[in-house]
Amino acid sequence: MKKQVLAFGASNSIKSINKTLATYAANQLTNTSINLVDLNNFEMPIYSIDHENNIGIPQLAFEFKELIKNANGIIISFAEHNGAYSTAFKNIFDWISRIEKDIWYGNPMFLMATAPGPRGGKSVLKMAVDRIGKSNPNVVAQFSLPSFGTNFSNKGITDPGLANEFKQQLQLFIEALS
């Protein structure tokens, strides 16, 4: 039976380089069904307890949570906004965390980040690994791609050292899916 992997860029930019990186990573998998998600399809009111009390949890939060539940693995590439998650991801994360305590269902996760600059989203990646790793010990791989415009083309990761590091991390994820 094919494994199903949920993949997305944690950004709502229509030209998201993180969605590009998540798509690239997912497309490296074989014998796997990929569910590539666009966060723009899950726009909800900004989370607050007042919204939750007045309108309840939006249906889109339940739909996103169902995608996680049905996955055998998750690939996320994080956009870095002022050193933190994008508001689009954080809002979805806040809403789905209200549905039930187990957010990620123990799914193996490959967490990544990229940015135009030389740090490659390292701050948000560290934040994501630390935070998500507290609720899911199955964060099995992580990768940061610096200087996206220089190190990525339509053929993939162009820097040989970074390409090798990516392949090593991807292999850890593949092994965890088995």
Image (tube, helix red, strand yellow):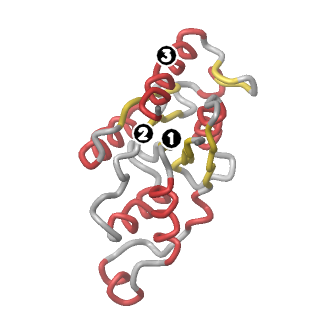
User: Measuring 47% from the left and 78% from the top, which residue is drawn there?
Assistant: 58
Q: Which mark is residue 31?
A: none
In the rendering, at what x and y percent does residue 59 appear?
Answer: 50, 77
Residue 12 as seen in the image, left or right of residue 165? right
Disc 3 secondary structure class:
helix
Badge 1 crowding class, 10 Å Cα cut-off, few under 14, some 14 to 19, many 20 or more, is: many
Instruction: Determine whether label 3 and label 2 are within 8 Å by CB.
Output: no
Considering depth in this image, is 69 or 43 the residue closer to the camera? 69
In the rendering, at what x and y percent does residue 142 appear?
Answer: 42, 30
Q: What is the C-alpha distance between the residues marked 1 and 3? A: 16 Å
User: Measuring 39% from the left and 68% from the top, which residue is drawn there?
Assistant: 95
Q: What is the C-alpha distance between the residues marked 2 and 1? A: 6 Å
In primary-sequence order, the first of circles 2 and 1 is 1
Considering depth in this image, is 46 or 104 the residue closer to the camera? 104
User: Measuring 56% from the left and 47% from the top, which residue is drawn there?
Assistant: 8
The residue singled out by tag 3 in the image is: 165
Badge 3 crowding class, 10 Å Cα cut-off, few under 14, some 14 to 19, many 20 or more, is: some
Identity of the amino acid at label 1?
Ile
Instruction: Determine whether label 1 and label 3 are within 8 Å by CB.
Output: no
Identity of the amino acid at label 2?
Met
Disc 1 secondary structure class:
strand
Instruction: Determine whether label 2 and label 1 are within 8 Å by CB.
Output: yes
Disc 2 secondary structure class:
strand
Quarter that holds the N terminus: top right
**Which residue ends up furthest to the right in the rendered image?**
154
The residue singled out by tag 1 in the image is: 75
Q: Which mark is residue 109?
A: 2
In primary-sequence order, the first of circles 3 and 2 is 2
